[in-house]
Structures are given as structure tokens and as C-alpha cells.
Image (spheres, rainbow, N blue to C red):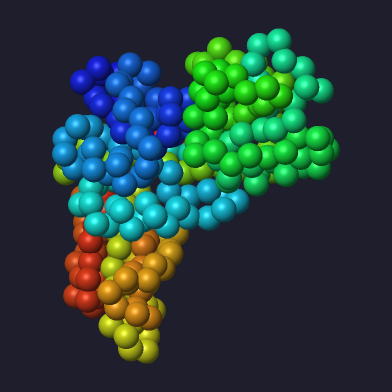
Amino acid sequence: MPANRKLRIAFQGELGAFSHAAATKLLGARARLLPFESFKAVFEALRRGEATHAVIPIENTLHGSVHENYDLLLASGALIAGETTLRISHNLIALPGARLSEIHQAFSHPVALNQCRQLFERYPQIKPVSFYDTAGSVKMLVKDRPPGAAAIASDIAARLYGAKILKRHIEDNPRNFTRFFLLTKQSTFPKRRNRPWKSSIVFTTPNEPGALFRAMACFALRDLNLTKIESRPVVERPWEYLFYVDFMGSQTDPKVARALDHLREITTFFKLLGSYQPTP
């Protein structure tokens, strides 16, 4: 996608967060980035038109789905216009001139701290301290300069705030990836050649035997490849569930269109969340 200063991308966290990296990967380095403290604020910025796009994490290979964002996505009316995946690599970051032996606490988001438990086992003198954001912890470190402190965040955050990386790739599991959605209020999006299409939907079924089986048959009968299915509770109806499904194909494909028409006939609620071309 061409870089464009008219693009305004909302994301949760501070500049240097992993969502910042995902936004740059999706929309280019020249797009204007709008950091917000919460996911709800990100969706509000998109709704108000303050942002033209939003980038949100939706799934992590180690911790599963970000359920808050599934719920906000459904309520917002936003459309998925793209997706990308980032490898999450954490770094122990300190002030320039600091030495590892001087570090006694490490600030970061609780998820990041949990993903680096082996670091704290190897260096028991370093205590984990929860903070609201990974990049935000680096920003705080440089601004407030607490003695004996470090942060755990991306290498982008270290460069952005002028901090020093003491140890790289400190995450316990190198197979740590996060999937991000690109959201917009637009109903169409530019096509890119030689990239596959993917679609995301959400629906509910009647509470009767075989209802979910019949829903899945809409795709199986047309040889459509499902890549994910996840259930979320319907808040106002206890023990009823929304089913989120991702599959390969575009809503403009006649085979997909027939599958979705069939699904609409046998479900009690249906919504197309978007057809998009993932960015490798």
C-alpha cells in the first residue's frame, strides 16, 4: 500500500509498541500514527473520523485471542481491510551507560513480563514490575530515570526513545507471533495482485442439534478452507454463542457468495466483518 500522510492510524499503546510496527508494515512509514491508551479509545477514534484506520492485535500464538477486540469489533461496525503477523521479540532495555549488574527491576506490560519468565529465573535480582504498555515503559524509563530500572519492549522502542538494549531476544518462546487486523469504515479496499483473499464473519445459530454442523457444511460443500473458528458468549443471552470464522476467499467470489447466502438462510444472526488480502 502506498505511503500517504493523509492516512491516520489509531493504535493502542505508545509509539514504539508492536502495534506501531504492525501499522507501519500495513500502511507505510509515512502514515500518521495516533497512539491511544485503550482499545476502546482506538475504536472511538475510528468511529469519530479522527482516524482513517485502526490497527489492533487480535490473536497471539501463545496467549490466544484478544477477546476484548472481538467484542469491540462487532459493536463498532468497522470493517477488516487487512491483516499482518509480527514475530514478537522482546529486549531488556536500559538507559545509556547502564550495566546489567545494576538492574534490579524491569517494567513492562504483564503479558510481555510473562513471556520472559526465564530471564527472571536466570537473573533473580531483577524483579518484574507491571506497566500499562511495553513501549510506554521505555518512554517512562528515559523520562523519569528510576535508579536500577530497565524495560522490556521492542527494539523500535529502544531506538525511538534513545535507550540501550542490554539483552536481545529474551522471550522464552521464539514461536511468539501476534496477528493484527487493519480496520476501516470503508466498504472497499484496493486489490493487490498475486495475494490470496481472506474473509471474516460472525454468526449465531439456532439452539438445536446439528445447527453448527449445518453452518460449517456451507463451506465444506464448496471446498472453502476455514482457517479459524472461535466462539464468544452472547452477553445478553446466557449460554448462547457468537461464532467467529475466518476462511480463504473473497465475498466477490461467486463460490463464496453462495456459501454466505446459504449461511444467512440457516443462522439467526450473520455479519460479514470484511474481505481482505493479508500482508505477509
Q: Residue at x 57, y 23 (%)?
A: 141
Q: Is residue 250 visible?
A: no
Q: Is residue 189 left or right of residue 146?
A: left
- When the figure is inspected, residue 15 is found, relative to residue 55, above or below; the finding is above
Furthest-bottom residue in this view: 209
Which of the image's four quarters has the N terminus? top left
Q: Residue at x 50, y 36 (%)?
A: 133
Q: Residue at x 36, y 62 (%)?
A: 244
Q: Is residue 137 visible?
A: yes
Q: Position of residue 43 (x, y in %)?
A: 27, 44
Furthest-top residue in this view: 97
Q: Position of residue 22 (x, y in %)?
A: 43, 32
Q: Position of residue 191 (x, y in %)?
A: 26, 34
- When the figure is inspected, residue 50 is found, relative to residue 199, above or below; the finding is above
Q: Position of residue 32 (x, y in %)?
A: 30, 21
Q: Residue at x 32, y 71 (%)?
A: 235
- When the figure is inspected, residue 252 is found, relative to residue 224, above or below; the finding is above
Of 60 and 170, the residue lying toward us:
170
Q: Quadrant of residue 210?
A: bottom left
- When the figure is inspected, residue 103 is found, relative to residue 185, above or below; the finding is above
Q: Quadrant of residue 109?
A: top right
Of 243 and 63, the residue lying toward us:
63
Query: What is the tally of numbered marks visible in this picture?
Result: 0
